[in-house]
Image: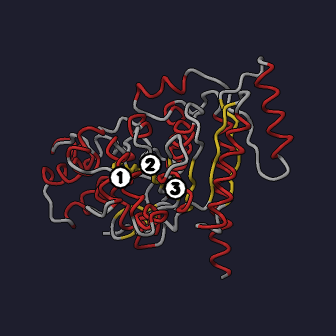
Amino acid sequence: MVPTAPPQSLDGSRPYLYSNGVRMVPSGKRGTVLGDNMRAFREGLGLNQSEFAAWLNERLQRKYDKQKISAWERGAERIPQAVAALLVKDIAAATGASGPAFIVTVANQKGGVGKTTSAVNLASLLAKAGYRTLLVDADPQANASVHLGIPVKHLEAEKRTLYYALRDECALDDVLVQVEHSGLYVAPSSITLSEMEVELASEMGADHVLKGCLEGVAKTFDFIVIDTPPNLGRLTVNALAAAHSVLIPCQTETLAMLGIELLMRSVTKAQRRINHGLRVLGILPTMYDKRLTQDRETLAEMHQTYAGAMRIFPPLPSATLYPQSVKGGRALLEAMPDAPGADVYQAVYDAAVVERRKLLEARHVA
């Protein structure tokens, strides 16, 4: 039964909305599901506690059991955010609480510039803020998937990676994995995705395969962040074709400007030929050490060359914590909100939220 007066959240912080017995949250807020609402949801599916645990495990790649479900429903333990987010997914889609998605592609043809780190941390910030967010790992190296502790080898063996969704062997929904701590959804990659570069060469409408794959889920997510390979091949072109905006991480080193120039040529071609609405969210200077003359000169050159044409975010300081966070299987800013560079990623987050709002307002006017 839906309560007439919403109780407090599990942390006692704020009231919530209800729909079909499952607690919802206002747009832009993060919430959880109370134990009695979980029980109602489970019973609505016609599952006992053991079956419900198996249902959760299949979707979240966890090992919950009947005892854990019982503890959550009795209020003896706090329900994890990933579980809560999974339970409100269908209701959020039905009530319009999520979607349509604003799609950000993170791209740079040069490797080692912090591209995956930026995609993972931006997506995690959006998810933690309550936006229903999907991270698409479109890089065959699967760095984003591994970064978040996703069992790539296991999922590849089950044919539950992005490659099989792009080949129409399954729906994209069938390969999504949810990160427990942030509630972020991930379309995982694997080395098999490298075969798409060859297969797309003979595919009709090859530049729009990823866009077509995302069309269904784009209606129920607020943000989709796409991590791309360190090249300008077919997968990156597909990511540019699918996006509303592109974020360009760029290391502050001597040859960085040449890389930006080459990528901007590809963005311009994409705008002209396959995606007229594509815009640049901004350039994100990375691995910046203000003590080094080279870094200061490169940053100054970025501003001199591009500041009048596009946004340049504050430089992300060089910090060993970011590569080290891979070992923990979590985005650094999800585990350490005050880590060096948190304010920089917050600026990128703010820009993405503003651009999504503009997109929604433009569609409303139209």
Q: For numbered disc 2, what is the local secondary structure?
A: loop
Tell me the number on the disc at residue 138. Answer: 2
Query: Quadrant location of residue 63?
Result: top left
Q: Mark 3 points at which residue?
A: 239
Labels 3 and 2: the sequence-earlier one? 2
Number of numbered discs present? 3
In this view, 46 is above or below 293: below
Q: Nearer the viewer, residue 212 or 182?
A: 212
Packing grade of label 3 (10 A; few <14, some 14-19, many >=20) is many
- x and y percentages locating residue 231 in the rendered image: 53, 43
Labels 1 and 3: the sequence-earlier one? 1
Quadrant placement of the C terminus = bottom right
Residue 173 left/right relative to 247: left
Q: Name the residue under label 1.
A: 162
Q: Nearer the viewer, residue 118 or 221?
A: 118
| Tag 3 near tag 2, CB within 8 Å | yes
Tell me the number on the disc at residue 232. Answer: none
Q: Distance between the residues labelled 3 and 2?
A: 8 Å
Does any portion of residue 342 appear in the rendered image? yes
Residue 362 left/right relative to 62: right
Query: Quadrant location of residue 201?
Result: bottom left
Q: Name the residue type under label 3.
A: Ala
- x and y percentages locating residue 312 in the rendered image: 76, 44
Quadrant placement of the N terminus = bottom left
- x and y percentages locating residue 176 in the rendered image: 34, 53
Which residue is drawn at the image coordinates 65% and 45% (left, top)?
248
Q: For numbered disc 3, what is the local secondary structure?
A: helix
In this view, 359 is above or below 7: below
| Tag 2 near tag 1, CB within 8 Å | yes
Which residue is drawn at the image coordinates 33% and 52% (left, top)?
163
